[in-house]
């Protein structure tokens, strides 16, 4: 499973895959601001209706 740090390290690649899989996500939803990783993750979990565990599993499968 990818850690949050690994996710942020490859963010552009992950962002593209998320946009392909979930057309409802916008660039604003996926904007990563340094130091705001938890805020981004919470925003994506809420937008996709996923729990933290479900979202982490989804990310690890990309």
Image (tube, helix red, strand yellow):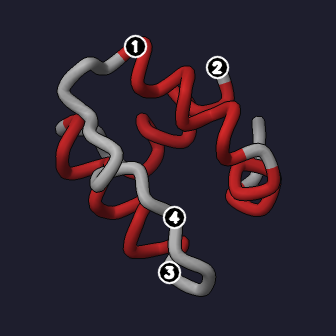
In the rendered image, residue 47, in percent from the top left (x then y), is placed at 18, 44
Q: Which residue is mark 3?
A: 36
Question: Tag 3 or tag 2, which sits nearer the N-term?
Answer: 3
The single residue placed furthest to the bottom in the displayed view is 35
Look at discs 4 and 1 and give the one toward the viewer. Answer: 4
Quick one: 24 or 58, which is closer to the camera? 24
Question: Tag 2 or tag 4, which sits nearer the N-term?
Answer: 4
Look at discs 1 and 2 and give the one toward the viewer. Answer: 1
Asked if marks 2 and 3 touch (Cβ < 8 Å), the reply is no
In the rendered image, residue 20, in percent from the top left (x then y), is placed at 43, 14
Asked if marks 4 and 3 touch (Cβ < 8 Å), the reply is yes
Which class describes the residues within 10 Å of circle 4: few (<14), some (14-19), or many (20+)? some
Q: Is residue 24 left or right of residue 50?
A: left
Image height of 49 relative to 24, above or below: below
Which class describes the residues within 10 Å of circle 3: few (<14), some (14-19), or many (20+)? few
Q: CA distance from mark 4 to mark 2?
A: 18 Å
Residue at image coords 71%, 49%: 7
Q: Which residue is mark 1?
A: 21
Q: Which residue is mark 2?
A: 62
Q: CA distance from mark 1 to mark 3?
A: 23 Å
Q: Which residue is mark 4?
A: 32
Question: Tag 2 or tag 1, which sits nearer the N-term?
Answer: 1
Residue at image coords 68%, 58%: 4
Q: CA distance from mark 4 to mark 1?
A: 18 Å
In the rendered image, residue 14, in percent from the top left (x then y), is placed at 63, 34
Look at discs 4 and 2 and give the one toward the viewer. Answer: 4
In the rendered image, residue 24, in percent from the top left (x then y), is placed at 18, 27
Asked if marks 1 and 3 touch (Cβ < 8 Å), the reply is no
């Amino acid at each position: 499973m990818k850690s949050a740090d690994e996710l942020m390290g490859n963010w552009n690649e992950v962002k593209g895959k998320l946009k392909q899989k979930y057309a409802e996500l916008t660039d604003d939803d996926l904007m990563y601001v340094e130091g705001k990783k938890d805020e981004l993750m919470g925003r994506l979990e809420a937008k996709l209706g996923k729990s933290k565990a479900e979202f982490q599993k989804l990310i690890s499968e990309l």
